[in-house]
């Protein structure tokens, strides 16, 4: 049985014995946490190297600027999350996530007209991104062979002499500026949009053209009384080129974190 509250992973001794080697995950955000969960079944030791400070409650993290903006879970994401962490969707909902019917609860202005709303049974789970990350992180905390290394920036890969294999990483502590090398059997890059992996592999120039799309977001939170308008979510799509702006209004969790 894994450490912790027993919801994580039941394991036989033979499964634990079959685990071998070390994996490093660059980035302790959503992709990094999920990668660590998958690797925990196979590797003896997983180290998540994250440049940011450890999360501070439900505040968006500095290195994840998109964390301030609206995020929802579509069905496929819910299924994958549930498969990796059984019961987590129910836990999110119990703690305050909002469940809506994608086609019935969304008032959507698209291509010059309001879309017809109808019940589809396609459920969307709505909450802020830090709320999701906190729940996933909470589960990963209970996986005994996963460790976190915060305030540590991966600065390059350690490559084999023939430069065909990644054998580890070099990282720099953000406070002490000390550099450290960690060797590994597998390195997973979950560094997000700011990933430097192509540069470290020296293949950046072969990866084609970069197109700057000049898209930006701004988000603001409002506290309102509940008013029944017949819908929960509102989306106004852009209509290019005349109307380049889009907008969305969606409710999020009422934080009930006593359970966490
Ligand atoms: C406005 C907006 C709305 C969105 N809405 C949705 C939505 O509703 N649903 C949805 O599924 N997705 C949505 N997305 C997309 C979603 O935000 C991203 O796909 C997702 O956050 C990517 O997660 P990630 O874990 O891959 O990367 P990130 O969350 O960007 O995390 C990367 C992590 O790696 C760390 N890191 C980077 N480089 C290094 C390094 N060298 N060393 C150590 N650590 C490093 C960073 O500090 C960070 O913690 C939205 C995006 C935006 C901008």
Image (cartoon, rainbow, N blue to C red):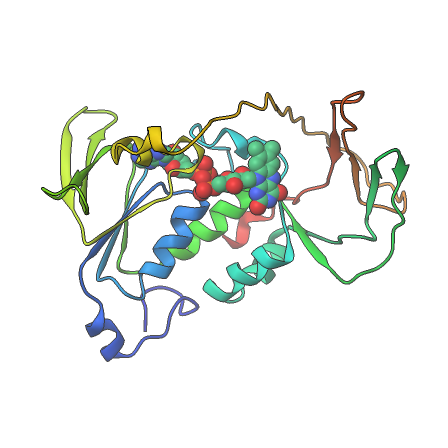
Q: Is residue 178 above or below residue 11?
A: above
Figure quadrant of residue 53: top left
Q: Nearer the viewer, residue 154 or 259?
A: 154
Q: Quadrant of the N terminus?
A: bottom left
Q: Residue at x 55, y 48 (%)?
A: 257
Confirm whether residue 53 shows in the render.
Answer: no
Q: Residue at x 54, y 32 (%)?
A: 66
Q: Residue at image x 42%, y 37%?
A: 192
Question: Where residue 4 sits: x, y (%)?
Answer: 36, 64
**Against 154, is 25 above or below?**
below
- Relative to residue 27, is residue 22 depicted above or below? below
Give whichever of 15, 87 is nearer the camera: 15
Q: Position of residue 162 (x, y in %)?
A: 12, 43
Classify residue 77 as left or right of residue 117: left
92 or 106: nearer the eye?
Answer: 106
Instruction: Specify the farthest residue to the left.
Output: 161
């Amino acid at each position: 049985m894994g450490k912790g509250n027993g919801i994580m992973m039941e394991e036989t001794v033979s499964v634990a014995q079959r685990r071998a080697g070390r994996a490093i995950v660059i980035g302790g955000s959503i992709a990094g946490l999920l990668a660590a969960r998958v690797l925990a079944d196979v590797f003896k030791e997983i180290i998540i190297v994250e440049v940011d400070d450890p999360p501070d409650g439900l505040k968006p993290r500095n290195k994840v600027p998109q964390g301030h903006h609206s995020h929802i879970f579509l069905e496929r994401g819910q299924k994958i999350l549930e498969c990796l962490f059984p019961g987590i969707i129910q836990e999110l909902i119990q703690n305050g996530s909002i469940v809506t019917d994608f086609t019935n609860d969304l008032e959507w202005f698209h291509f010059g007209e309001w879309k017809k709303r109808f019940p589809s049974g396609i459920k969307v789970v709505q909450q802020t991104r830090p709320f999701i990350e906190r729940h996933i992180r909470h589960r990963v905390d209970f996986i005994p062979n996963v460790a976190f290394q915060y305030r540590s920036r991966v600065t390059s890969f350690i490559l084999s002499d023939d430069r065909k294999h990644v054998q580890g990483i070099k990282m720099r502590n953000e406070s002490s500026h000390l550099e450290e090398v960690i060797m590994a059997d597998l390195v997973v890059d979950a560094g997000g949009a700011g990933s430097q992996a192509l540069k470290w592999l020296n293949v950046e120039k072969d990866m084609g053209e970069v197109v700057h799309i000049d898209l930006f977001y701004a988000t603001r939170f409002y506290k309102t009384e509940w008013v029944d308008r017949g819908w929960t979510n509102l989306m106004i799509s852009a209509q290019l080129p005349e109307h380049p702006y889009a907008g969305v209004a969606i409710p999020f969790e009422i934080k009930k974190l006593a359970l966490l």
